[in-house]
Image (tube, rainbow, N blue to C red):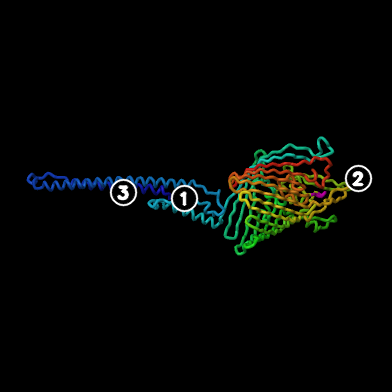
Amino acid sequence: MPLKKLLRPTLLCFFFSLALSVSAQTNATQTASNEASPTVAPAADSGSNSTQTKSESEEVLRLLRAQQAELERMRELLKEQTKTINELQRRVEQTEVRMTTEVVRTTNVAASDTLAEAMRVPTTAPAPEGQKKEDADAAKADAERRKRNETLSKQFGSMTISGDLRFRYESFYGLLNATANDANPAILGNPLTTRQRFRLRARLNIRGNFGKDFDWGLRLATGSFADGIATNQTLTDFYNRKPFGLDQAYIAWSPERVPGLRLQAGKFDVPWVRTEMTIDNDLQPEGFNQIYSRGFKDSVFKNLTFVAWQLPFLERNSAFVRNPNGTISLNDSERGGRDLALYGAQVRGRFEFSKQVALTLSVADLYFSGTQFISPVQVFGNLLLLPITFTIPATATTPAQTITTQVAIPRDLLVAGNGNLGLSTATNNAVNRDGRLASGYNLVDVIARLDLKHSKQWPITLVMNFVTNTQTHDVVVAGPGGANQFLKNNENNGYYAELLAGKQEKRGDLQFGYTFVRLEKDAVLTPFNFSDLFQQSDVRAHRLIFNFTADPRVLLTLTGIVTERSNGLLGVFGSTPPGSLNRPTTRLQFDTSFRF
């Protein structure tokens, strides 16, 4: 029962008792006055009793004064009691209002906060000693809430909530198309108008753990469901609702008995060290990974880490393929139903030569299984344009003809995965005449990172990355008379260098960065790498970054990316006419990021 309801009958009883006490005291005073008042005596006794009468009168006056003093004291006591009751009633009302209006705290929760601490309703300062009894019920209710929250904490473990919101203005300059030039149809390329757009990224993270060995995480993020390497959402489409989907969902086991071991399953951040040249920062792979890390104290060699991963990225329907004679082709059926996955491992070590100088070296192997079944497509609205090649048999009057065309299919077949067609909307790799990727992809990725901390305000980081694809194959194109023709494919290397100076930790921090990227046509698998490049391979790019920390939770970033096509508009395996336009493309981004 609320304190306010208990207080009212208590106050009424108190006032009634007080009134009875005052009435009793008044009656006693009147009785004493009547008994002490002089009566008319016979004249004969006036002389003998005069002294006694005077003494009794003085006694009565003394009693009256004492009674009057008692009444004054009772009045003061009544005033004090009334003041105390009013204060107590005010405190009870404030407590009830706070209990009914307080919301659960879900922002600014430190990583060490437990769920019970995050949901605890703040209490007032401890009451004075004289008011502890009056606040007993409120303290009991608060204790019950604490107990319930502790029960929830035991069930769900500790939990933290965080996220970020980023607003971006982006513009493009120097764009070209690949059609015949308007002024000179013998060459390709027409300048396009500049492009401006506003983009939004919103992410919400929930992290927690239960027990000593397990931790888990969920993250929701904006972005197109069909694009796995970007979480940006363009402000367009007549104010339609923006997709907000599951970006992470994982659970990890780090057994206390085996320090350094971590086993993870679900959809998670990339667990190995890499640069954007091979894997975009926004990509969240799915599957399993295992990490074992061991540190060394009294040595320049400080850490050794092994990472392995098994990441399926396309599950295909079962296939049933017949030979031309009607028998079952087991080999073709197996190939037609083969799933696609990324397998790999990495070993890395860290050396600390001093407190100011550290070097990290890593070597990884990334094997993309089944990439020969990927077919690049173009997306227009809700349709995918799928390249199709077929042969018209020869007749008595015409020779056989091989025709390549494009067929439009709903993009839902790609987004929902119901068709399991092995389609990719983001690729710039070499393609055979049948529309499929020409090469396989087994990437050997070597990274060196040097950290120099001689200046606290301007630490320097230098990153060097080299990647080579050991599974490139010659490209099949249509030759004279429709016969296959093979083009030599030496486009298998990628180079990446990055320099960062400064930091972005506290208010007023500055950071400058420069990145150079050179990617040959089939050096990496382009559905997964650097999305901000104008094209993701057969490219040379320069990136400049300037970061300003306006507040520990507010970051301002200006980025410029200049992209050059290394081999013309149609690429290294195209037939771009001599003299065709091939100017650099500039992409500017201004970001305002809010972190909570």
- Quote the CA–CA distance across marks 1 and 2: 92 Å
Figure check: 327 above or below 193: below
Query: Which circle, 3 or 1, is nearer the viewer?
Result: 1
Q: Which residue is mark 2?
A: 398
- Quote the CA–CA distance across marks 3 and 1: 35 Å
The residue at the point 31 percent across, 45 percent down is: 76
Q: Secondary structure at mark 2?
A: loop
- Residue range (magenta): 430-434
The residue at the point 77 percent across, 52 percent down is: 493
For label 3, the crowd category at 10 Å Cα-Cα, with few meaning under 14, some 14 to 19 and many 20 or more, is few
Looking at the image, residue 112 sits to the left or right of residue 94; the answer is: right
- Looking at the image, which residue sits at the far bottom? 257
Figure check: 146 above or below 23: below
Q: Which residue is mark 3?
A: 17
Give x and y (percent) for residue 452: 65, 53
- Looking at the image, which residue sits at the far top? 183
Q: Which mark is residue 328?
A: none
Q: Which residue is mark 1?
A: 123
